Amino acid sequence: MPAASVDQILEALDPEQREVVTAVRGPVCVIAGAGTGKTRVITHRIAYAIAVGVTDSSKTLALTFTARAAGEMRARLRGLGIPNASARTFHSAAIKQLMYFWPYAFGGSFPSLLTMKSGAIAEALNRTDSALTPQTSTLREIASEIEWAKVLEISPDEYVESALGAGRTLRIPNNRPDKANFEDISKVYQAYETLKQQERAIDFEDVLLLTVGMLEEDRDVRERVRDQYRYFTVDEYQDVSPLQQRLLNLWLGNRDDICVVGDAAQTIYSFAGASSSFLLGFTKRFPSAQVIRLSRGYRSTPEIIGTANAILRQGGMIGEHGHELASMNEHGAKPEIAKFDSNAGEANYIAKKISELRAKAGEHVEVAILTRTNAQLDIFERELRSAGIESQIKSSEKFFERVDVRDAMRVIRSASVLPTEGGNWFDDLVAVLRPFGDTDYVHAFLALAKSMQTSQTIQEDAVSAGSAITLRTYLRELEDRAEQNNPPTLPGVVLSTLHAAKGLEWDHVFLAGISDGVLPMGNDVEEERRLFYVGLTRAKSELHLSYSGTPSPFLSGIL
């Protein structure tokens, strides 16, 4: 696929986006509100910098926080004729370097990687005299605490004091004080680290710690890495942890060819060690940095954006911590708040509303139910099932490990090497998938294909580059998604927590369970307010808010 020209890269960009794309010499800080086209801007900026000779594609590294986001970046860059630019998560970039240099820096073979902590933590728990029980929820809470400690480089011996000092709160189903649970978690944390050493295993946090240590201690390795990557872009910069920032500093060295993109109003992972201080303090480190704000919203209606802006004003977040957006879309329905006496009544109402919506707009209409916790999703799943409505809990299944999905991909792969019949790759895909029937994964494959044909995320970039999408292009997108465990959207209503919904969008969003004591939850009210803001801005066309019992204080005065 030929690389896009300068004119092709810049076309269809608004003035703010164009300012970012043409600011190819760092340092650059982009404050990008929800739905302002930041991924488009990031990829077009990289393409523009390559087109004007500022950097080479092999020297660029775009960093983000999810495999899905990294995969989307790579797809858009391929559409712009740049197939070999690196777009990775911090962990993916670090593990690639660590594995390559391991024999040189550490000697021996690379250790095994723990992709799931629960089993090892359960074994560590058994090795201690802890009063904690191996319930799934407890193991999950212990894992979260260990991850928080490690990204902040807190040792097991330091954990109790650090957790108390940070005001950490635990959701462990016992009546013990937090300090007692912290002390037991410290024991499990130490046993977990000992177990990994005995098994010669590392976890994802170790990947970052070991990479940092390797680069700090080995000058030769450090210089080789710095020679490889010279042009950096960091997405979702408000979510970097101190450990990730330390690694980024080592990659960057004394250079300043870096562009960071983020929105402090969407900082929702402070509990996991993330900090918006690096975004807010970027100009202190780089006084000459250009700061550009993207304020034109292309995702949501004016009514939805107006509600989101009200939350920013409510929390006093207008300024460096957030800025109001202006919708570029047509007007739509005003969000409404529905009150219920019980959770069951709320779930029943939402199921009926979704049934009405699907009857009117078709069963494949984009609908999501978002809640604060996973436990809240269960009642909605049951209610939808009773109503005969298909649903899926986000990330509940590894899509690409299904036998039927692998079989379908093999057929697509075989067809991709054959000439396209009649010049229409989509028709060929439909024909190839016909023997697999009217299944959820076939619908997911076709929905992805249609989005590649018509959306402004991939197709427009491909057209701009002067090359049409082919079945082979589509297959590469599928393979890339499989590698990153980033499945296409399955049919049915999506059930998701607010945290898991970050970076996603749907036409119709039901933000449910907005009750006092649930949202906000815990002591960090401002982080909870930002989480609510993220939920509001997932909706494109319609937003439905609901609660049972006492309403969340966040609902006061926003509509």
Image (cartoon, grey):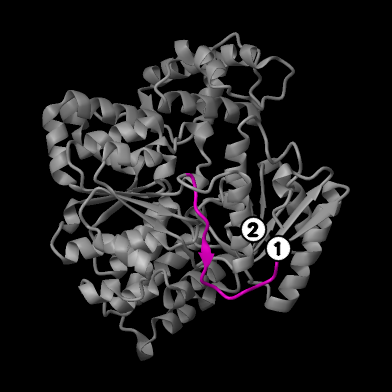
Q: Which residue is mark 1?
A: 335
**Circles 2 and 1 in contact, beta carbons < 8 Å:** yes
Q: Is residue 327 magenta?
A: yes
Q: Is residue 357 magenta?
A: no
Residue 307: which numbered mark, if any? 2
Q: Specify the segment rendered in magenta.
A: 321-335
Q: Residue at x 58, y 15 (%)?
A: 182
The amino acid type of the residue labelled 1 equals Pro
Local secondary structure at mark 1: loop
Indicate left or right for 242 with 402 as reference.
Answer: left
Compared with residue 45, is residue 67 higher up or lower down, i.e. above or below? above
Indicate left or right for 382 with 28 as reference.
Answer: right
Magenta span main SS: loop
The amino acid type of the residue labelled 2 equals Thr
User: Are there few (<14), some (14-19), or many (20+) residues within 10 Å of tag 1?
Assistant: some
Compared with residue 228, is residue 277 higher up or lower down, i.e. above or below? above
Please state which of the two labelled residues, at mark 2 or mark 1, is closer to the viewer. 2
Residue 534 point in image, percent of width and height: 57, 51
Please name whichever residue, 431 or 129, is drawn nearer the observer in this view of the structure.
129
